Image (tube, rainbow, N blue to C red):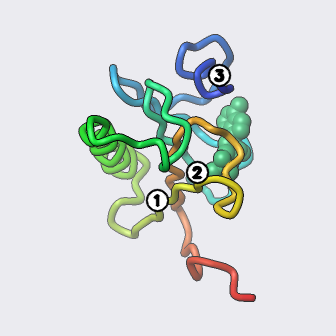
Amino acid sequence: MSTIFSKIINKEIPSDMVYQDEHVTAFRDIEPQAPVHILIVPNRKIATVNDIQEEDEQLIGKMFTAARKIAAEEGIAADGYRLLINCNKHGGQEVFHLHMHLFGGRPLGPMLLRR
Ligand code: AMP
């Protein structure tokens, strides 16, 4: 089953796309939680981290290369940023098309809320 991210990748619905190549697409999150909040998505759907196969290793690497390039373009590379991937219910995953969040543009605070 495809998700809304496939429609964004295929440009069937609008998005604020910042990067696309034959393997990876990146666009701004619709509900940003930091001054820079971008989602980096493989063009080929993988539902969750649990579904990554060994043959996907190059593709996963390309997500990180895209993150590096985008962070530089957004001007946040030197100050720093956070990359985050949610998996399934306890991870808080809402869209079941693998995606890496890129957050930056301000100090991001502790990694998890303490409770
Ligand atoms: P996650 O909880 O890791 O699955 O994150 C899903 C993210 O997708 C959330 O941060 C949403 O705000 C974001 N999102 C959902 N729909 C869209 C959309 N149409 N365009 C951009 N971001 C979206």
User: Which residue type carries mark 1?
Assistant: Leu
Q: Position of residue 102 (x, y in %)?
A: 50, 53
Q: Earlier along the polypeptide chain: callout 1 or callout 3?
A: 3
Question: Does mark 2 have its CB less than 8 Å from ligand 1?
Answer: yes
Q: Quadrant of the C terminus?
A: bottom right
Quadrant in which residue 87 is drawn: bottom right
State the separation of the CA atoms marked 2 and 3: 26 Å
Name the quarter where the N terminus is drawn. top right
Residue 100: image location, x then y, percent: 49, 48
Q: Which label number is shown at residue 109? A: none
Residue nearer the viewer, 55 or 94: 55
Work out whether mark 2 precedes mark 3 in sequence or the reverse, and give the earlier one.
3
- The answer to whether 7 is drawn above or below residue 58 in the figure is above
SS of the residue under disc 1: strand
Q: Nearer the viewer, mark 2 or mark 3?
A: 3
> Which numbered mark, 1 or 3, is in the foreground of this view?
3
Q: Which residue lies under the disc numbered 3?
A: 1
Q: Which residue is mark 2?
A: 37
Q: Residue at x 58, y 56 (%)?
A: 86
Q: Are marks 1 and 3 in contact (CB under 8 Å)?
A: no
Residue to which mark 1 is pinned:
83
Q: Amino acid at mark 2?
A: His
SS category of the residue bearing label 2: strand
Q: Residue 7 occupies which quadrant of the picture?
A: top right
